[in-house]
Image (cartoon, helix red, strand yellow):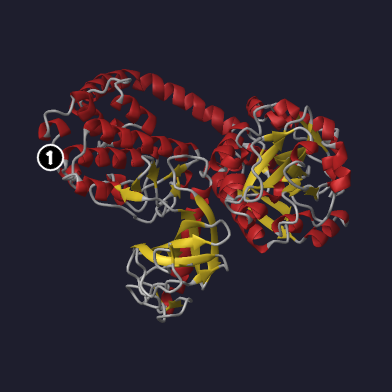
Amino acid sequence: MKRCNSCLNLIDDECVFCPLCGYKEGNPPKELFQLYPGTVLLDRYIIGKVLGVGGFGITYRAWDKKLDTIVAIKEFYPISLVNRVPGTNNILIYNIQREKDFYAFKEKFLDEARNMAKFNSESNIVNVYKFFEENDTAYIVMEFLEGECLSDYLKAHNRKIELDYAVKVIEEIANALSKLHKHGIIHRDISPDNIFICNDGKIKLIDFGAARFSYDENKKLTVILKHGFAPPEQYEWINKQGAWTDVYALGATLYLSLTGKKPVKSTNRRVKDTLPPPNEIDPDIPDYISNTIMKAMSVDINFRFKNVDDFVAGLRQKKFVAPVAVEKKKAKKKRSIGIALSLSLIVIGLVVSSFLWIKQKNEGTLSECDLVMWYCKSGDKELDKNELQSYKNIISEFNKSYPAVKIDVVGFEENEYKKILKNGGKQPNIYEYLNIDSGTNHLSLEEIYNSENFNNYTLLNQVNRVYGCYDYLPLGFVCPIIFADSEKVEYDKNSVSSLKDMFEYGSFATDCKDFSKIFTESNTYYNVSASDMFFSNQIFFYGTKSSNYLKVSRKMTAQYKLIYCGVPEVCCWYSNVWTANDIDKKENKAALKLLEFMLNENGQDILHIRNKSESFPINDRALDLYVDVYGDFNGFFENKDNYIFERQEL
């Protein structure tokens, strides 16, 4: 028996034509730029027939030799930028002037895989098994779905489906979107083309090609949209997009599913909104469903559902939804009353604002001065580039409030950094502390620790015990973690209280000596090469510090499970620790403000989340956001009282 190179089913060795799909062995693909049937990727995946082609990729049916199963493989192939010599595998960039575009788009393609891989446990989101680079391009290996997309399903049912089933489909996708939104991701391409109805009845959300992190809203976003399903804000280069963006598209998808009519382009509705409510097209559609759809599709964000949960509540009649026109009339009336009240309060407001301005002038503003901040580079070019950019972004945000303060940030290699700190000389105002003092007097940071915001920094309450004073300010922390190879073992526990629990599944090693403070037996399993052993499948469980999370997650994408230490006391370490020199009164005041800004939610977001740093945010709210974005850490910090900090010797 052999496998047909097109449909991948087993056929007799003598067959020239496949009796199941008609493919003749050796025939080229339909389009010559596609990979030939029978091509092998990563010495593991046999390429079969093409399932679909888009502007940025080709999706193939494929056979996984390792797991003996059919998978779908998406190849990054931007048709406008590349070509392929028929019968070869490598792609060629034929417009060298757009080479930068190719690599930028490829990184976004891999971002799609990373985003999808975070949700492999969700039943309504297509699973990603692996992604890799080969043939000068990139590939995503996904679960193979049998069935059809909603757009084809609608065509087969005269563009309309029954109310109950249409609502069920939308609710299933809303459930998937709710998970994405909680992790800070918006899909931005919801439409019938990206909703898949499986033969077993499951409803799956597919294709994350347009997904972007919602907290990136102030950056220029690529305009990726489908007319009729994209809200007005998606047509703009600089815009504010969020969960409400997906709500509009979900409402438009339900509109089409119930009426058979594709909604008009949303930007046209801004000029004159002639879109009829669904119950005007089909009187059998209940008013509450019609009102809910029209609210979801409001071109004015202020009258649209802010999240998918509220949208679903309207569909289930758990939330009363008035017609949008009625809501607008009420809002107009409230505005009229508000204007009258505002006029009567103007005089009082002027007096109060004048008082506050004088108070801020005396207490809040900073005098013109120059600050110098030093930090130690990691030695990793990519991480160092990200870190410098994060400090520059922090300074830029800080200067919006304190424009008179000029800040110069300088990074040094570790050996040079330690040397200049030991040798004294002219010192910076603030610097990253590596257990080496500059020899000058420290500026006390007790003002920060006594501020009203300190309640937001639960894990900083051990600083005095660790350092013996309040002269040091950690901006992050590191904790112990355990990786499990999810391709090799099925370890269903989210935490481990004894290493013995894991040994019935496979072997363990750690490259963190401090694991012995958590699990006494871990001394036996210490090995400086534990990470290499994990990557080469010599061990199935790998214990390390969370500072190695990004390294492992990139190397073992969609092939690991993260386990936290469920013991009474977990030994952790402060990281990214800063201190300040007592130099000048004006500079000291500005230095304290800058350190406090680096500690607040905005500064921590820039430093740890957007920068993807090697440590966790020390700010509670920023830590919650970090966990939402990197869902692997769900459950890690529910009991912070278990976390005991020790001084980390560098």
**Above or below, comparing residue 86 to residue 150 in the picture:** below
Q: Is residue 295 visible?
A: no
Q: In percent of the image, x 66 and y 55: which residue is there?
A: 551
User: Relative to residue 536, is residue 264 drawn left or right?
Assistant: left
Could you say which is closer to the camera, residue 614 or residue 285?
285
| Residue 196 pos. (x, y %) | 35, 47
**Above or below, comparing residue 621 to residue 410 in the picture:** above
Could you say which is closer to the camera, residue 614 or residue 418?
614
**Above or below, comparing residue 465 to residue 122 in the picture:** above
The amino acid type found where label 1 is placed reads: Thr
Q: Is residue 20 visible?
A: yes
| Residue 246 pos. (x, y %) | 35, 41
Task: Tell me if mark 1 has few (under 14), some (14-19) or many (20+) residues whose alpha carbon lies within 10 angstroms of its own.
Answer: few
User: Relative to residue 648, is residue 263 drawn left or right?
Assistant: left
**Residue 274 lies in what quarter of the image?**
top left
| Residue 313 pos. (x, y %) | 34, 25
**Above or below, comparing residue 102 to residue 364 in the picture:** below
User: Relative to residue 563, is residue 226 drawn left or right?
Assistant: left
Circle 1 is placed at which residue position? Answer: 274
Instruction: Look at the numbered disc 1 and give the secondary structure of its residue.
Output: loop
| Residue 210 pos. (x, y %) | 39, 53
Could you say which is closer to the camera, residue 529 or residue 425?
529
Q: In percent of the image, x 42 and y 72: which residue is there?
A: 35
Q: In percent of the image, x 42 and y 38: which residue is there?
A: 176
Q: How many marks?
A: 1
User: Relative to residue 401, is residue 75 drawn left or right?
Assistant: left
Could you say which is closer to the camera, residue 426 or residue 290?
290
